[in-house]
Image (cartoon, rainbow, N blue to C red):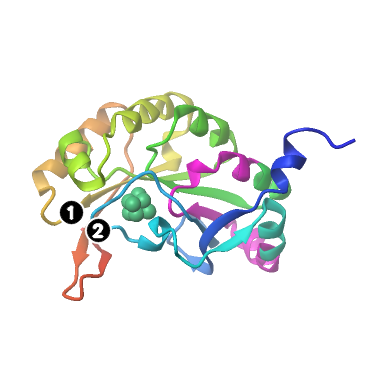
Amino acid sequence: MQKTGFNKEAQNEVSFIGVNRHRIGVDGEGVTTLAAFHGCPLHCRYCLNPSCLDTNARVHKFTPESLYQQLLIDDLYFVATGGGVCFGGGEPLLRPEFIRQFHALCAGRWKITLETSLNVPLKSLQMVTPLVNDFIIDIKDANDEIYMAYTGKSNAQVWENLAWLAANYDREHVILRVPLIPEFNTEEDRERSVERLSKIGFGNFDRFTYRVEETGIRKLGDRD
Ligand code: SF4
């Protein structure tokens, strides 16, 4: 007889917008593969991966097992460089059960990094935190009015989750992205975000500017 939960969930395929191999120095230590989930609770005005919001986007379906099998090809790179898998998206914390099952397959050998907005229920964060080696958190702006204008949603849940994370996780392994977002915030707003985040104990900030190109394509700009 099958056990409940794990086996049943393992049958479930989840949609990804892409899997990018051989990334170095962008998603944490060593060689990493970025596995980008489809789906996100936010609607950022300059979304960097609009296909994760597009219901007609071309997606790849994986179970935790089939993703693990696909990524095994880089096992040697991961182990030799202290790298592993970065789950991004979209929003990886919409899929905590997938991450839990994936982690069970590669436990201890591959590092797991999460690139997340943290705008998800606290229980999803609590479920995966013990499995995660590094967090990269996309703060956008600490000010709720700016955040709401830019993403379409309040950041109240983000603050609840940050407070929990500050108290329950090694803050040295958390990078907070604080972008300058043309037409939405200013240098002063950004420094206010940094100050507020510093007060709850975080210290690793990634400052950069979104680059709005003439073609309308928005990209992460150079680090400030
Ligand atoms: S959080 Fe990321 S994926 Fe989601 S809408 Fe914003 S930029 Fe796009």
Quadrant for the N terminus, please.
top right
Q: Secondary structure at mark 1?
A: loop
Question: Real-space Cα distance between discs 2 and 1?
Answer: 9 Å
Quadrant for the C terminus, please.
bottom left
Foreground tag (2 vs 1) = 2
- Identity, as a three-letter code, of the amino acid under mark 2: Tyr
Residue 65: x and y, percent?
A: 72, 54
* Start-end of magenta stretch: 71-100
Q: Are marks 2 and 1 in contact (CB under 8 Å)?
A: yes
Q: Which residue is mark 2?
A: 46
Which is nearer the eye, 208 or 126?
Answer: 126
Q: Residue furthest bottom?
A: 215
Quadrant of the image occupied by residue 95: top right
Q: Which residue is mark 1?
A: 181
Q: Residue furthest right?
A: 1
The yes-or-no answer for disc 2 within 8 Å of ligand 1 is yes
Which is nearer the eye, 182 or 136?
Answer: 182
Say if the magenta span includes residue 84: yes
